[in-house]
Image (spheres, helix red, strand yellow):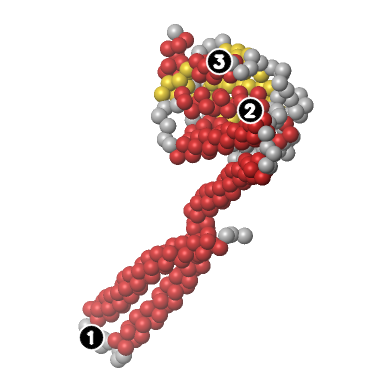
Amino acid sequence: MLPSMFRSATIRLTGWYLLILMTLSIMFSVVIYQVASSEVRTRLESFQTYLQGTDDFMPMPMGTVALRNSQVAAANGNISIELIYVNLFVLVVGGCGSYFLARRNLLPIEKAHEAQSRFTSDASHELRTPLAVMKTELEVALRDKNATADSLKETLVSNLEEVDKLSRLAEMLLNLSRFDHTKLKFVPVNLNKVAHSVVKDFDKLSNRITLSSKRHLIVKGNETALAELMRVLVDNALLYSPADSPIKITLSKEDDKAKFVITNTGPGINAEKLPHIFDRFYRADSSRTNGNRKGYGLGLALAKSIVELHNGDLMASSKPGVKTTFTFTLSLNQKYQAKTQN
């Protein structure tokens, strides 16, 4: 069922398409009628002149002109009827075609509108939850006349955690918006260098990550965006795996593509939920998170957006209770790749 706004827009656009089509059809019909009518009249007059010229001694029968005019009128009538049928056919077929084109043109706009509405609704919900927690804790602290310094400090610490969550959410929303609407500047990027830099940053917090890369892989892309892509995948692996489990990253060349694979152990993702993990604000299972480090379901959506901007592929596979693997592939920059090999 189409929303009323897009239903009325589809009807209006269909009407405009049909109006243009029928205007052209009627104009051509008028021209065809004039040309055909003139041609019939000219042919009959030529034939009559020919008959008069073949036998000067045989007078033309009475009423020849009237007969000719009646034949012209009959031909014009037949042409008019045929053109009316043609225009009715154009009206019916054109109406169906116009509706199809209108729906086809409006469908991306409708999907974008639905995605924006869903995104706004989800973002509002995510923002409302920490704000409600902060408000409740502050109200309780203000009403408690016997509140001690320790209890007030605990409230402030809790509020600070909620502020951190809001900051992370705001940062993710800004990144999504930036990568959705910004045309990135692409240059040759060494994926190995980017991966080592990202792993080094995470090693300050965790030494669970191992990176395996035997050769330099050069792709054409945006280094900042690709670094963010890797950070999202590493952070996701850390977030949804046991605290002492290893995270394995492999960089390799496959045909003419660079392949990045990251694997973690843990609860995994059920098969029916796997196709939706790249949707914004989708969390396959909030219970898989480690303690209070709860994600917002935006990281993988951001990763997907970055990979698509680079015309690459991002895939996920999971065996619940065993391991989860994320893989993205990007086309190699053959010119610079050849230089690194030489």
Camera-side mark, 2 or 1: 2
Whether 291 is drawn above or below 12: the answer is above
Whether 15 is drawn above or below 251: the answer is below
Q: Distance between the residues labelled 2 and 1?
A: 106 Å
Amino acid at dot 2: Asn
Camera-side mark, 3 or 1: 3
Amino acid at dot 1: Phe
The quarter of the image holding the N terminus is bottom right
Image point 71% across, 21% down: which residue? 243
Amino acid at dot 3: Lys
Which x, y percent locates residue 277?
Answer: 65, 36
Which x, y percent locates residue 19?
Answer: 42, 67
Q: Residues within 10 Å of mark 3 (few under 14, many from 20)?
A: some
Camera-side residue: 70 or 239?
A: 239
Whether 190 is drawn above or below 309: the answer is above
Residue 315 in view, yes or no: yes
